[in-house]
Image: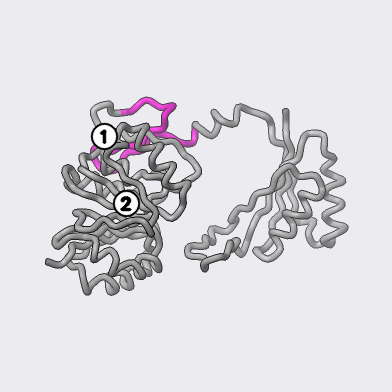
C-alpha cells in the first residue's frame, strides 16, 4: 500500500523532541538525516550527537490525515515551523529489490572485488569477496574501508599473519584471507561485529583462517600486518599496543583518519614506526608504516 512521509527540518537539540511528538501523532517510525553535509566524526564516549541541521522524517500509513498532523504540529510548535514541514506520498514498491539496486559490485585495485550475493561477479577470475550490507559497519563503500582494501590488493598478503583491529563486518579480514593470508585475527568490542565477521568468513569459505576476539581476550603478537580502520583518537591511544603486536619490519595500516589529523597520527607513531606512506580519498587518509627493527 502507499505510505505518507512528513519531513521536518530542525536542529540537533530539537530533533529528539520532534521525533517523540510525531510518534505521538501516529508516526509508524521516525529517522534522522544530516541535511547540510555536516558529519559528526568522533563523538564523545557515551553520547549520541545529531547534526546541527537535522531532518526528522516520519512515516505514516495511507489513511492518516496529514493536514490534521500538520495543523497539530503548528499549533504545538508555533507558526514559524510551517515553512520547515514537507509532506509527500510514498508509493509502495518492492523495497528489498529497490535497495538491492543501490549496492553493486565494486573493484578495489586491480584484482579485488566485493560482490553482493544477488549479483554475478564481473570478473570470475578475480578475487571476489561476497558480502551483503548488514548491521555491522563496512562493505567497502566508505573511503576509509576502500583505502584499506586498495592497500591489501596492492601489497603481498599471501602467507602472512594479519590483524583486522576494529573488524566491523569483517570485510578487511575476509579480503586478507581470500588474498592468501595464513591467519587473520579479527578484533572488535561489538559482539554483533564478531558475529557478522564469522558469517561473512563462512560465506566466503575462509572461516578456518579467521579467528575472532574481543579486545580484552586478544593476545596475538608478532604479526606481519596490522590493519586498523577506526578513528584518530583510538589510533593514538593504541600505538604502544600495536607496536607490541607488530613484529620488527612488519607493517601497520591505519585508516579512519581525517586529512587534518594525519600529522598527529604520524607524530604519534614515530617512536616505533618508520617509512610512513599516506594515501587520500575525499577527506580521509590511510597511513601505512613499517615497524622499526
Which residue does the numbered mark 1 point to in the structure image?
127
Q: Is residue 268 above or below residue 212?
A: below
**Whole-percent x, y for residue 65 in the image:** 85, 40
Residue 94, by quadrant, is top right
Q: Main secondary structure of the magenta part?
A: loop
**Whole-percent x, y for residue 6 in the image:** 73, 46
- Residue 164 — which label? 2
46 sits to left or right of 274: right
Crowding around mark 1 (Cα neighbors within 10 Å: few <14, some 14 to 19, many 20+) is some
Q: Mark 2 or mark 1, which is nearer the start of the sequence?
A: 1
Q: Residue furthest left?
A: 293
Q: Is residue 273 magenta?
A: no
77 sits to left or right of 115: right
Q: Nearer the viewer, mark 1 or mark 2?
A: 2
Residue stretch rendered in magenta on the structure: 101-122
From mark 1 to mark 2, how far is it between C-alphas? Answer: 19 Å
Q: Is residue 229 above or below residue 61?
A: below
Residue 204, by quadrant, is top left
Query: Which residue: 72% across, 31% down?
Result: 2
Amino acid at each position: 500500500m502507499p505510505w505518507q512521509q512528513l519531513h521536518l527540518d530542525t536542529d540537533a537539540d530539537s530533533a529528539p523532541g520532534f521525533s517523540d511528538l510525531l510518534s505521538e501523532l501516529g508516526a509508524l517510525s521516525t529517522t534522522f538525516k544530516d541535511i547540510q553535509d555536516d558529519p559528526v566524526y568522533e563523538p564523545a564516549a557515551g553520547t549520541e550527537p545529531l547534526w546541527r541541521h537535522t531532518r526528522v522524517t516520519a512515516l505514516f500509513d495511507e489513511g492518516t490525515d496529514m493536514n490534521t498532523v500538520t495543523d497539530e504540529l503548528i499549533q504545538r510548535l508555533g507558526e514559524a515551523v510551517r515553512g520547515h514541514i514537507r509532506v509527500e506520498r510514498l508509493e509502495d514498491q518492492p523495497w528489498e529489490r529497490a535497495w538491492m539496486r543501490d549496492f553493486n559490485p565494486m573493484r578495489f585495485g586491480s584484482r579485488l572485488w566485493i560482490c553482493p550475493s544477488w549479483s554475478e561477479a564481473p570478473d570470475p577470475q578475480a578475487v571476489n569477496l561476497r558480502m551483503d550490507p548488514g548491521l555491522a559497519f563496512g562493505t567497502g563503500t566508505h573511503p576509509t574501508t576502500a583505502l584499506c582494501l586498495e592497500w591489501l590488493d596492492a601489497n603481498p598478503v599471501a602467507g602472512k599473519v594479519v590483524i583486522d583491529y576494529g573488524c566491523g563486518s569483517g570485510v578487511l579480514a575476509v579480503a586478507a584471507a581470500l588474498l592468501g593470508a595464513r591467519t587473520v585475527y579479527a578484533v572488535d568490542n561489538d559482539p554483533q561485529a564478531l558475529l557478522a565477521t564469522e558469517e561473512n568468513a563462512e560465506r566466503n569459505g575462509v572461516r578456518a583462517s579467521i579467528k575472532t576476539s574481543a579486545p580484552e581476550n586478544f593476545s596475538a603478537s608478532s604479526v606481519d600486518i596490522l590493519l586498523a580502520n577506526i578513528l584518530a583518537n583510538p589510533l593514538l591511544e593504541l600505538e604502544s599496543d600495536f607496536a607490541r603486536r607488530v613484529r620488527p619490519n612488519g607493517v601497520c595500516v591505519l585508516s579512519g583518519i581525517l586529512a587534518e589529523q594525519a600529522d598527529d597520527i604520524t607524530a604519534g607513531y614515530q617512536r616505533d614506526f618508520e617509512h610512513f606512506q599516506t594515501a587520500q580519498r575525499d577527506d580521509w587518509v590511510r597511513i601505512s608504516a613499517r615497524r622499526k627493527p
